[in-house]
Amino acid sequence: MSYDLVVVGGGPAGYVGAIRAAQLGKKVAVVEQERAGGTCLNWGCIPTKALLKNAEFFHQLQRAEEFGFKIGKIEYDFEKVIQRSRGVADQMAKGIEYLFKSKKIDYFIGKAQITKDKKVIVAGKAEVLEAKNILLATGCVPRLLPGLTADGTTILTSREALALKKQPESIVILGAGAIGVEFAYFFNAFGTKVTLIELLPQILPLEDAEVSTLLTRTFTKSGIEVLTETKVEKAEKTASGIKVTTSGKETKTIEAAALLVAIGIQANLNGVLGEGLSLELDRGFVKTNDRYQTSVPGIYAAGDLIGAPWLAHVASHEAIEAVEGIFVAGKKPHKITIFPGCTYCQPQVASIGLTEKKATEQKLKFKVGKFPYRASGKAVAAGEPEGFVKLIVGEPHGEILGAHIIGTEATELIAELGLAITLEATLDEIQATIHAHPTLSEMVGEAALAAKGIPIHI
């Protein structure tokens, strides 16, 4: 069969790109080796958020007396917690499959291989898909430490952690980026002894230093052992679990029931490129030009496999840009430079644009506006007074260079700042925007006032 576009990979880049091409009236096929939605929907973003909601709910139940309720001993079924997460992923995957059907996108399940003459062979299928254009959206897979193999019980990546049938009594989490931090919060909330290890000086290394400092303090208070500037020299399985030897700022030997490795990802190209076909790579990721075309004409790539930032919403945006660049006359795609980053532990973390450190390194003239959650009536009423909103503001014009939020619903609040940056809004315009009272979003306006030196509520 012949198609205008064959998409290899059905995750946030693949399925969104396919739908956009179908909207443009093109004949489209998607090949996904596992299930529509890819890693994000089935083994990443969506199921982890289901688990984190369980953790948050369990934590809220434990605080019941603060809100005037007496509910006695609280018990939980860990296996059902995991099952709920898998059920959410299954429901959402069915939704993507429905979209394919409703938009007349042909959907093939099987491992795809692209031939040198740009045909797509689907393992186990009789037909070969002929494509005028191919969008490669196979995403990434977790990286493990050399010599370790994930076994689903003792040595885990995020994928195996999402399918655990038994809660580990203790766990070492290697890597304190968003994935490591979210799992640290989840396991700790249910009573697992958690040790979080990070090679760099702070957890969430890409976030503003003040945000990371507050999150570290909160995690430590909740019982998570946080080790920064610490390197794992050796990790080995034992009769009871895992033994980890560290060096650096913290030199010690740690024994635990399980090890979760969250040190990064690598492009998923295993078996995708047929004999005689190769693509130019950049540090292991597929290199693309300003139109998202790879080194082979007619083959495009979007999403995690083309490199950082490894975020589902960025992948979807890239895919739309790539598809419109192929099929819309005169459309010139652009590479994404401004995007929100979100971490869904509690307190939540969200940011966009420059950190204070980056602004300083770039020798920009700027000022900072900061407003604490404890001064927000809505946050205090909700029993969530921990956190702050921080704005990095350029001088002399007052444009928003960056925004950083830690606290409840931070991942929802960041959208306003993203829009502000996109529209080149200034402090004056944010101040002039009336925020409803009482809401958490008032803190954005208050942070703007703080940057101008005229805060009302602090």
Image: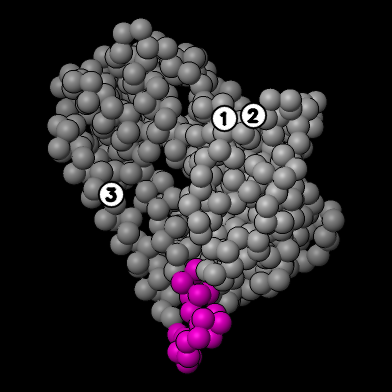
Figure quadrant of residue 125: top left
Viewer-side label of 3, 2: 2
Residue 419 in the image: above or below residue 297: below
User: Does the residue at mark 1 contact the one at mark 2 (Cβ under 8 Å)?
Assistant: yes
Callout 3–callout 2 Cβ contact below 8 Å = no
Provide the residue span drawn in magenta: 55-75
From the viewer's side, name the closer residue of 201 and 391: 391
Q: Residues within 10 Å of mark 2 (few under 14, many from 20)?
A: many
Compute the Cα span from label 1 to label 2.
6 Å
* Farthest-out residue, top: 330
Nearest the eye: 421 or 162: 421
Indicate which disc, 1 or 3, sits on the residue closer to the N terminus. 3
Query: Which residue is label 2 attached to?
Result: 399
Q: Residue at x 41, y 46 (%)?
A: 40
Query: Dot 1 corresponds to which residue?
Result: 425
Q: Which residue is mark 3?
A: 93
Identified at 22% across, 43% down, the residue is 97
